[in-house]
Image: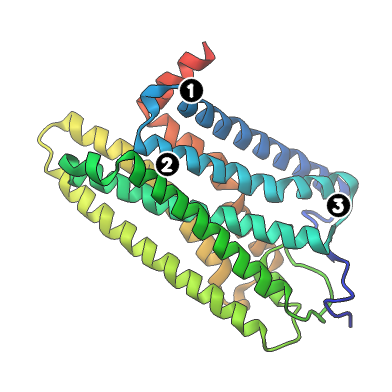
Amino acid sequence: MPNSSSISQFLLLPLADTRQLQLLHLWLFLGISLAALLGNGLIISAIACDHHLHTPMHFFLLNLSLTDLGSICTIVPKAIHNSLWDTTTISYMGCAAQVFFYFFFISAEFSLLTIMCYDRYVAICKPLHYGTLLGSRACAYMAAAAWASGFLNALLHTVNTFSLPLCQGNAVGQFFCEIPHILKLSCSQSYLSEVGLIVFGVCLGFGCFIFMVFSYVQIFRAVLRIPSEQGRHKAFSTCLPHLAGVSLFVSTGTSSYLKPPSISSPSLDLALTVLYSVVPPVLNPLIYSLRNQDLKDALRKGLS
């Protein structure tokens, strides 16, 4: 069996068995990626160009759109290329780069979702302290911390994963290089260190999720005390989309990484991976723009 020093490329999971279905998936992925590029690009342009949107909430939304663009551009182009040319290969360095950049963007995105939850909590539960707790400098520090934590997390996981000896072949059972599937190729007990890192990351993510749940409990309690029905509607309209986006991202991602091997199958793995890696970058622009009147006005102004 080959070891990691002799592996020059990995074999990715084809999206379909027949050529016709491969081309169908190609057009589907192309449409999804173009929709993500268009939606997130419009949000970034609108927020960057309209000074009325230079608020903490929109600043974090701009950063979220950047992570969405980065994550989908990391994995989808290679899947489209493989479907177009009827191949399944990716180079060793290409696989390592894909793991690093995807973990970088996905980790930063989860940190930003947590920060955005804190932003909504302060805006609704502590409105008099909003300018103090979320000033321009504090927002810059929090965004920088999100990106830095994503970089550190990606670096640790990538170095740890690709330093393992691989002797179980080179077939990755996913349409892009994903760490759990690469660990299955390891022939050394040292892979447990990477499993430990993943467990630590999941626990940290679970802690962030508990913080989000606690924040939303406080938010909904505060919203229900608002005497004005219009005020309650406005508060719910800014919070519920965020909660929906977080729920989709966390539930599918956790299911993909923590589901027991006994219920694992290529089709189930593929479906869960698409739900947490490809769908959120497309849905996030819709979730955060359709319920945001200021952003919709800026987009109409920019397109007119």
On the rendered structure, is 38 left or right of 3? Answer: left
Residue type of the residue flagged with mark 2? Phe
Distance of mark 3 from mark 1, alpha carbons? Answer: 46 Å
Residue type of the residue flagged with mark 3? Thr
Distance of mark 1 from mark 2, alpha carbons? Answer: 15 Å
On the rendered structure, is 302 left or right of 119? Answer: right
Residue 161's place in the image compared with 56, above or below, is below
Q: Nearer the viewer, residue 71 or 238?
A: 71
User: Which residue is depicted at the point 66% across and 74% down?
Assistant: 160
Residue 261 visible in image: yes
User: Which residue is depicted at the point 55% across and 55% down?
Assistant: 106
Q: Nearer the viewer, residue 37 or 149?
A: 149
**How many residues crowd around disc 2 within 10 Å: few (fewer than 14), some, or many (20 or more)?**
many
**How many residues crowd around disc 3 within 10 Å: few (fewer than 14), some, or many (20 or more)?**
few
The residue indicated by pointer 2 is 60
First in residue order: circle 3 vs circle 1 = 3
Extreme-front residue of the structure = 137
On the rendered structure, is 280 left or right of 74? Answer: left
The residue indicated by pointer 1 is 49
x and y percentages locating residue 257 in the rendered image: 57, 69
- Give the SS element for disc 2: helix
x and y percentages locating residue 116 in the rendered image: 37, 47
The residue indicated by pointer 3 is 18
x and y percentages locating residue 176 in the rendered image: 73, 58
